[in-house]
């Protein structure tokens, strides 16, 4: 019968987190199971800055940051892409929305070190060949901005919607921005702008 005591030392499962100081070669705790090999141990990182590479807006960007740094903080800090806003910093307002492999996500809820090879797109990256994304232009045209703090995140979600559904319904727009909090109450203008940017409006 396999008990927890016999299973864990023999398991081929990778260790989820190494004890501090066990990451370096030859620096393994003597209490570590003898059967554990070096490849089984995920090296502890931090608390000091570590080298990272993120693909942001189609460009591989190398920088150093502490492993505790979120994607939002890395974008605004190390990468100086301040279009992404941090408001609540706890995943409730969506102000920090960026795309990860084309899908809108809140960037304050993922560590930069966990992004890996996935493509990050920020509000700055929506501009193509010098032209604003239709959602960006429509937000300006429909005055869908007051203080502007929620605006980049709103644009990222509305642009993603338009890219996957060029003729969204009003309900689809409302669903796309349902996680976004705007203290200034720009919602009617945001919906009008997104519908105006749709192919339906242009036909
Ligand atoms: S700042 Fe990220 S969800 Fe509010
Ligand atoms: S425009 Fe001010 S929070 Fe939305």
Image (cartoon, grey):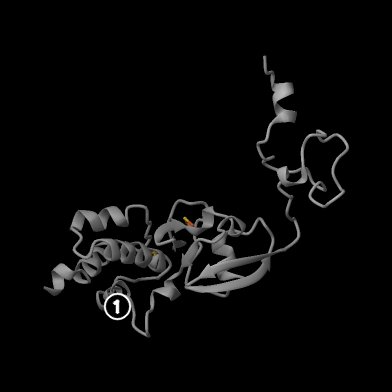
Residue 34 figure quarter: top right
Q: Is residue 191 above or below residue 134?
A: above
User: Picture coordinates of residue 79 (x, y %)?
Assistant: 58, 73
Residue at position x 14%, y 74% in the image? 202
User: How many numbered circles does the render carry?
Assistant: 1
Numbered disc 1: secondary structure = helix
Residue at position x 40%, y 70% in the image? 148
- Residue sitting farthest toward the top: 1
Residue at position x 22%, y 65% in the image? 166
Residue 29 figure quarter: top right
User: Picture coordinates of residue 127 (x, y %)?
Assistant: 38, 78
Residue beneath label 1, please? 137
Residue 66 figure quarter: bottom right
Where's the N terminus, which quadrant? Answer: top right
**Pick the front one: 136 or 19:** 19
Position of 41 compared to 179: left or right? right
**Pick the front one: 79 or 114:** 114
**Pick the front one: 52 or 5:** 5
């Amino acid at each position: 019968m396999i008990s927890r005591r016999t299973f864990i030392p023999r398991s081929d499962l990778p260790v989820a987190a190494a004890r501090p100081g066990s990451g370096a070669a030859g620096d393994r705790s003597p209490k570590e199971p003898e059967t554990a090999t070096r490849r089984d141990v995920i090296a502890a990182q931090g608390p000091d800055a570590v080298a990272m590479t993120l693909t942001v807006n189609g460009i591989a960007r190398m920088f150093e940051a502490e492993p505790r740094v979120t994607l939002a903080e890395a974008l605004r800090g190390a990468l100086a892409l301040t279009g992404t806003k941090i408001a609540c910093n706890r995943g409730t307002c969506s102000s920090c929305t960026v795309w990860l492999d084309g899908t809108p996500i809140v960037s304050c809820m993922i560590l930069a070190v966990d992004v890996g090879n996935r493509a990050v797109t920020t509000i700055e990256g929506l501009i193509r060949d010098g032209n604003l994304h239709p959602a960006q232009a429509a937000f300006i045209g429909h005055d869908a901005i007051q203080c502007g703090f929620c605006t980049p995140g709103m644009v990222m979600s509305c642009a993603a919607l338009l890219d996957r559904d060029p003729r969204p319904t009003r309900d689809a727009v409302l669903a796309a921005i349902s996680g976004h909090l705007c203290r200034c109450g720009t919602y009617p203008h945001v919906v009008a702008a997104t519908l105006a940017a749709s192919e339906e409006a242009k036909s």
